[in-house]
Amino acid sequence: MTDGVFAFAMTLLVVNIELPEGFHPKTNQEFLSGLANLSDAFIAYLITFFVLVSFWFGRAKEDGEPEMASAAYAWAVLIHLLSVTFLPFSLLAVGRYDVPAAAWIYGANMILLALSALAISLCAERDTGRALPSGRVELGILIASAVLSIVTSLFAPAYAMLPYLLNLASPLAPRAVYQR
């Protein structure tokens, strides 16, 4: 129950990062300049997120339960949670602005999300000493679609989200890969 409260609070942090009213960038430079004006909000978001992480770690240690996961696993989960909590902002940016940099932010968020999920899987395998279902193929497709989105944004920002449709085929990919 307490973990959920921490996760909810961490997710709400990103809601406080608001783009200015009347902000309508036409170029990457205008968009990135507008984001630079939010640097104080981004820094406060990160600091508060990691303060909550330190409280969460402290609370977890006080429970007196035996250590269930390694520190590497815990940090991978927290980095994953950080990327999840940043999704509303990156979605807002890519949904609202037809500039390549908005697609870059969303793509970077997706790549961090996939890499942290992969790290969680690898840490869990190392910690348990056994192979676990990892979704590596699907995570690879997510990374590939994010990279394709970033490249697409350079030529046609309005179509930069289309490469993510590749993820609809990701449930079929493991069968194709592992049947070889």
Image (tube, rainbow, N blue to C red):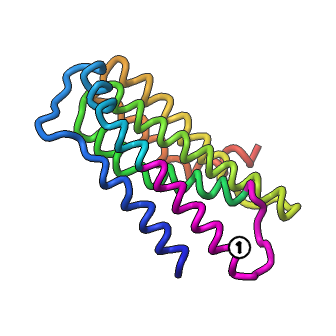
- Residue 132, horizontal then vertical, whole percent: 77, 61
- Residue 130, horizontal then vertical, whole percent: 86, 62
Is 66 in the magenta? yes
Q: Callout 1: few (<14), some (14-19), or many (20+) C-alpha neighbours within 10 Å? A: few
Q: Does residue 106 sit above or below 69 in this rendering?
A: above
- Residue 96, horizontal then vertical, whole percent: 22, 39
Is 73 in the magenta? no
Dominant secondary structure (helix, strand or loop) of the stretch shown in magenta: helix
Is 96 displayed left or right of 38 in the figure?
A: left
Q: What residue type is labelled 1?
A: Lys
For the record, the magenta segment spans: 45-72
Residue of label 1: 61
Toward which corner of the image does residue 73 lie, by quadrant? bottom right
- Residue 55, horizontal then vertical, whole percent: 57, 67
Q: What residue sits 37% from the left and 19% below the top?
A: 154
Considering the image in quadrants, where does the C terminus appear? top right
Q: Does residue 89 sit above or below 11 in this rendering?
A: above
Extreme-right residue of the structure: 129
Count of numbered tags: 1
Is 1 displayed left or right of 149 in the figure?
A: right
Q: Does residue 42 sit above or below 97 in this rendering?
A: below
**Viewer-nearest residue: 72 or 174:** 72
Is 166 displayed left or right of 115 in the figure?
A: left
Secondary structure under the numbered disc 1 in the rendered image: helix
Q: What residue sits 76% from the left and 66% below the top?
A: 69
**Viewer-nearest residue: 101 or 9:** 9
Q: What residue sits 84% from the left and 56% below the top?
A: 126
Q: What residue sits 77% from the left and 72% below the top?
A: 68
